Amino acid sequence: MASLGRSALLPQCSSCIRRVTRLAWNTGGPLQQLRMKTKAAKEAERNIVVKLIKDVPKYGRAGSYIPLNPATMRNQWFPRRFADYVPFLQLRQLKAQGVDMERDFEFGVVRPLEEVEEDEEEVIRRPKHYVRPVEIELLSPERSMELLSTFIPPTIDFARQPIGQDKAPAGQRYGASDAADVLTAAVMASKPKPEVNGIYGSVSTSDVVATVKSALAHNDEAARVLLSEADVRFIEGHAEGDPSRLKKLGTFRAEIRVPGAEEAIVRNIRVRAKE
């Protein structure tokens, strides 16, 4: 039965034999099966080249060029400012310059460290490479003060909860008798009264430094300014015994100066009631 089944697939007449022979002769060999493009190959042809604005794990570092699906770029990456489109002329120049436009699958991937057993003699013979320390160019005091004057607004606002004053409602008795009223009034008079416009907590120089650093972080050069709590000083309004804190509502002046600068800048520190 198997032999009959195989023989049925062979040409049964002379014309069929000639047709099969002619096809094999014209093609220069046996008939070959044509393979269609895979789904991955078709998707790779549809991809566009984009420029990364931020570091994206498993894709690449900011500034690199990678291929990306157009729908992903249009719906997710471009609205979230992960990447930007590359104009056609710029893309052609990049290809002419041989710029790498491949995705880095290993970027940002943290792999677990495993202990590796090595031969002690091999480790001793292995040459040690010199690693040059990273050098960060520091800004001069004059340039730091210029950046502080530019990016710090004239008034820095802080919101704090004010302390409520203890007041007895009109007509309310303190105790059940006149003697109790006198005793209660004496006790309340002995309590220290809260400061007018007092607040819960405080506004410290560290709060001012944190707010200033947040304002400087939007500029690459200004973010390199080194500022500490010792560089900020409240000129007025600070708490007694603690010149680094404000303990009441109002507008007060603070002095900011980095080490080495000749003159300081003065800014208003406004403490307002939290709504």
Image: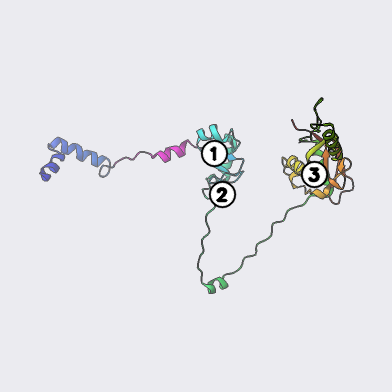
For disc 2, the marked residue is: 108
Residue 213 screen position, x and y as percent:
75, 43
Would you call the spot at circle 3 few (<14 residues within 10 Å), some (14-19), or many (20 or more)? some
Secondary element at tag 2:
loop
Would you call the spot at circle 1 few (<14 residues within 10 Å), some (14-19), or many (20 or more)? many
Left or right, residue 251 beside residue 92? right
Q: Residue at 57% x, 44% y: name it.
A: 56
* Residue 269 visible (yes or no): no
| Dot 2 or dot 1, earlier in sequence | 1
Disc 3 to disc 1, C-alpha distance: 49 Å
For disc 3, the marked residue is: 204
Secondary element at tag 3:
strand
| Dot 3 or dot 1, earlier in sequence | 1
Whether 22 is among the magenta residues is no
Residue type pointed to by label 1: Val
Query: Closest to the observer: 140 or 228?
Result: 228
Disc 2 to disc 1, C-alpha distance: 20 Å
For disc 1, the marked residue is: 49
**Which span of residues is magenta-colored?**
33-48
Query: Closest to the observer: 86 or 214?
Result: 214
Query: Closest to the observer: 245 or 138?
Result: 245
